[in-house]
C-alpha cells in the first residue's frame, strides 16, 4: 500500500484524526494542518476526504489481515500442546500490541465505531468482514489448543468475547484521569492465564 511519503502521512493522519474525532467533524483543513502536507495533496492522492477515509479503512483492514497471516494459524495447529501454549501467549500479545502502538487508540475507535454502525455503509461492511476473519482465526487456534488438552471447545466464544472486549477497553483505560490500580500488564497476564489454564 506504500505509494510515497506524502500518501503515508495522509493515511497516518487520517487514522489519528478520524479515530479521535470521527469522520464528520474532521475537515480537509484539519488533515492538511496535522500532516503538514500541501492542500492539493489530498485531491491528488485520494480525490477528497471521503476517498481518504475509504483508503484509511482499507489500510486498517489490510493491516489486520497481514498480522493474522504472519501469526500463521496453519503452523500453529501442527504444534504439540506445550509449544501451542507458548505460541498462543505470543499471538495474543502480538495482536494486542497492534492497538497499543502509534495511533493504536485511534485504530480501535474507528473499529468500534464502524463495526457498531447502524447502516451497511462501505466501512461497516469492511470492518464486519475483518472482525469475522479475526474470529475465524481465533476459533482455529483456540480450537486446536483446547482439543490438544482434551478440554471442551464450547468456551471459545466466551474467550473471543473476552479478547475483543479487552481491546475495546484499552482506549478508555488509557484515557482515565485516575487509572485502575491494576496495571494493564497485570490484567493482560491474568487474562492469558485464564485463557490458557482455567476451566472456563
Image (cartoon, rainbow, N blue to C red):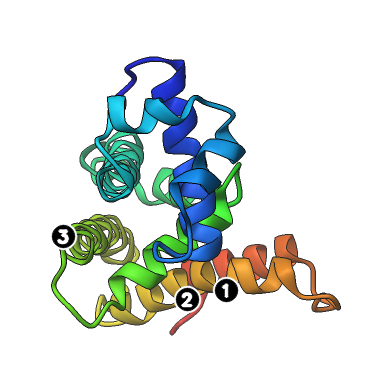
Find disc 1 in the rendering and name its residue. Answer: 169
Left/right placement of residue 75 relative to residue 88 reads left
Q: CA distance from mark 3 to mark 2?
A: 24 Å
* Residue furthest out toward the top: 4
Q: Is residue 82 visible?
A: yes
At numbered mark 1, what does the secondary structure look like: helix, strand or loop?
A: helix
Question: Which quarter of the rendering shows the N terminus?
Answer: top left
Find disc 2 in the rendering and name its residue. Answer: 165
- Residue 184 vs 33, above or below: the answer is below
- Of tags 3 and 2, the one toward the viewer is 3
Query: Mark 2 and 1 residues: CB-CB less than 8 Å, in contact?
Result: yes
Find disc 3 in the rendering and name its residue. Answer: 122
- Residue 105 vs 167, above or below: the answer is above
- Residue occupying the point 44% across, 46% down: 28
Image quadrant assignment for residue 22: bottom left
- Residue occupying the point 39% across, 75% down: 159
Amino acid at each position: 500500500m506504500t505509494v510515497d511519503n506524502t500518501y503515508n502521512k495522509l493515511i497516518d493522519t487520517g487514522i489519528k484524526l478520524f479515530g479521535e474525532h470521527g469522520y464528520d467533524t474532521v475537515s480537509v483543513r484539519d488533515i492538511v494542518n496535522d500532516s503538514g502536507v500541501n492542500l492539493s495533496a489530498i485531491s491528488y492522492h485520494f480525490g477528497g476526504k471521503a476517498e481518504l477515509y475509504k483508503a484509511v479503512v482499507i489500510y486498517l483492514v489490510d493491516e489486520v489481515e497481514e498480522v493474522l497471516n504472519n501469526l500463521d494459524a496453519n503452523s500453529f495447529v501442527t504444534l504439540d500442546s506445550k509449544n501451542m501454549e507458548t505460541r498462543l501467549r505470543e499471538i495474543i500479545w502480538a495482536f494486542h500490541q497492534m492497538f497499543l502502538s502509534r495511533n493504536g487508540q485511534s485504530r480501535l475507535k474507528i473499529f468500534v465505531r464502524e463495526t457498531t454502525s447502524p447502516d451497511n455503509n462501505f466501512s461497516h461492511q469492511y470492518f464486519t468482514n475483518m472482525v469475522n476473519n479475526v474470529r475465524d482465526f481465533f476459533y482455529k487456534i483456540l480450537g486446536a489448543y483446547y482439543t490438544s488438552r482434551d478440554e471442551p471447545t464450547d468456551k471459545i466464544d466466551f474467550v473471543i468475547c473476552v479478547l475483543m472486549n479487552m481491546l475495546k477497553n484499552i482506549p478508555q483505560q488509557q484515557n482515565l484521569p485516575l487509572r485502575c490500580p491494576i496495571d494493564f500488564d497485570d490484567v493482560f497476564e491474568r487474562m492469558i492465564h485464564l485463557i490458557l489454564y482455567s476451566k472456563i
